[in-house]
Image: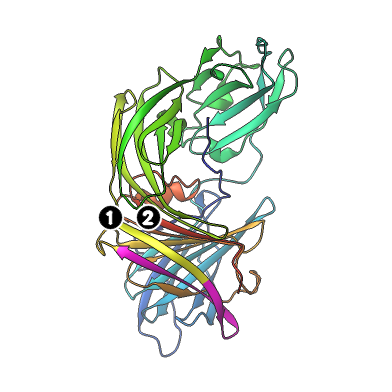
Amino acid sequence: MSRPHPASTLLVLALAPACTTTPQVAIPGERGDVTITTWTDGAVAGGVGVYVHDDAGEVRGHFESDARGVLVVAVAPGWSATVIDDLDGFRYVDTALGLVPGDAVAIGQRRRLSGEAPPLRVAALAPIDGATRYAITVCGPLTTTSPVDDPTRETMATYDRRALDDDGGALIVAEAFGLDDAPRFALVDADDVTKLASPVALPAWREITTAPVFVAADPEALEVAVSLRSHHGCVVGAGTSAGGDVPVAHYPGLPIERAAATTWFRRDARQTSWTSRRVAVQTDKPAPTALVADVPARVDDVAVQPYGSGTVVGWSESGDPLAGDGVVVVAGPTYDAQWTMVMPRGRRSVILPRLSEVPAGAPQWINVSIVDLDEVDDWSELTAPRWDQAGWTATGTLANPVE
């Protein structure tokens, strides 16, 4: 069955309560205070550096949060603030764009990401005649898959910490591929993966089933994808089609907590665009038989070009201007870095703030999403992006841009 792309870590920006007792850091000539709470690796942290940029991307100051992780700094409307953090060889860059005096924002990683997750010992699997490949997946908000070299022996499965939900839970899934009939699976539902008995013994193999889900899609759509999520945020079913009946392969017997239809409007060598709607929130229900993929808004033509000594990212939008009240821009400046920028909806371009820690020029890839800030609660899913979640209205993407 298909898997969502396990994007590298996305960073979190959230509203935070203001703190009026922190001394103000003044920037001469500017207009009003914003309150910034700095986070790193899942906790509020003090002594964290904060860059402040003007609306042209120029650095206007570099400050540190106090011992409580709070900084009050005066800015003009449209300025930005950035926190940079290096965790286990990966660089996380957080930027809150479009600040206005009076804002209170939290910048930084709201989930712990540093430190290796302990490997998972999985007991030997019963071989299946005809199977050519086996794998063990830890499936939560993100999926991490380990190959099984010999199913008759124990497997040490490694996984990304982001594959666990906030309580440490996930589905542990073994899959067998290459069979003439349906692929097979076996799974264990773990409330806390670290507390499982070792080695983990999986139950008997079962068949992955396929059932149609009818999707009413926009006539301009090139392709429609359906995803089904169970508890822990795990994708337990997925399928694609040009429209109409979408064959969805899924693990049977699991309650579906969320079903989504994602409409793709364009795919070519360099650009894609899609709209992620409608999301049906369910509780302890089976897979739906029909979904409506309405298209409230679209993001197209994501582009990048030089701007003076810096870089500007631009995009076009169509559809309902009230479909979302925020924009999230996520870029990969290098293979080992992720830059997340959050701003109110309304602008269709952004000058990337100049940072010595980020290489100048076009990022390797860029995603631009229209979001509903109220539904994207706490920005927690930015850690492991789930485009099919409520609140993510539309996304446009540009890979390998050429200046």
- The residue to which callout 1 is attached is 296
Looking at the image, residue 216 sits to the left or right of residue 140; the answer is left
Quadrant the C terminus occupies = bottom right
Please tell me whether the stretch drawn in magenta is mainly helix, strand or loop: strand
Question: Which contiguous range is marked in magenta?
Answer: 304-318
Looking at the image, residue 225 sits to the left or right of residue 284; the answer is right
In this rendering, is residue 303 above or below 236? Answer: below
Q: Secondary structure at mark 2?
A: strand
For the question of whether residue 15 can be seen, the reply is no
Q: Depth check: 183 or 59 in front?
A: 183
The circle drawn on residue 394 is 2
Residue at 43 percent of width and 74 percent of height: 349
Gap in angstroms between the C-alphas marked 2 and 1 = 8 Å
Residue at 32 percent of width and 64 percent of height: 318
In this rendering, is residue 291 above or below 97? Answer: above
**Crowd rating for badge 2 (residues with CA inside 10 Å; few <14, some 14–19, many 20+):** many
x, y (%) of residue 142?
A: 52, 39
Q: Secondary structure at mark 1?
A: loop
Picture quadrant of residue 86: bottom right
Q: Earlier in the sequence, mark 2 or mark 1?
A: 1
Residue at 35 percent of width and 50 percent of height: 376
Looking at the image, residue 139 sits to the left or right of residue 298; the answer is right
Please say if the residues under marks 2 and 1 sit with CB atoms less than 8 Å apart.
yes
x, y (%) of residue 119?
A: 67, 29
In this rendering, is residue 3 above or below 219? Answer: above
Amino acid residing under circle 2: Ala
x, y (%) of residue 69?
A: 48, 61
Q: Depth check: 96 or 211 in front?
A: 211
Q: Residue furthest bottom?
A: 29
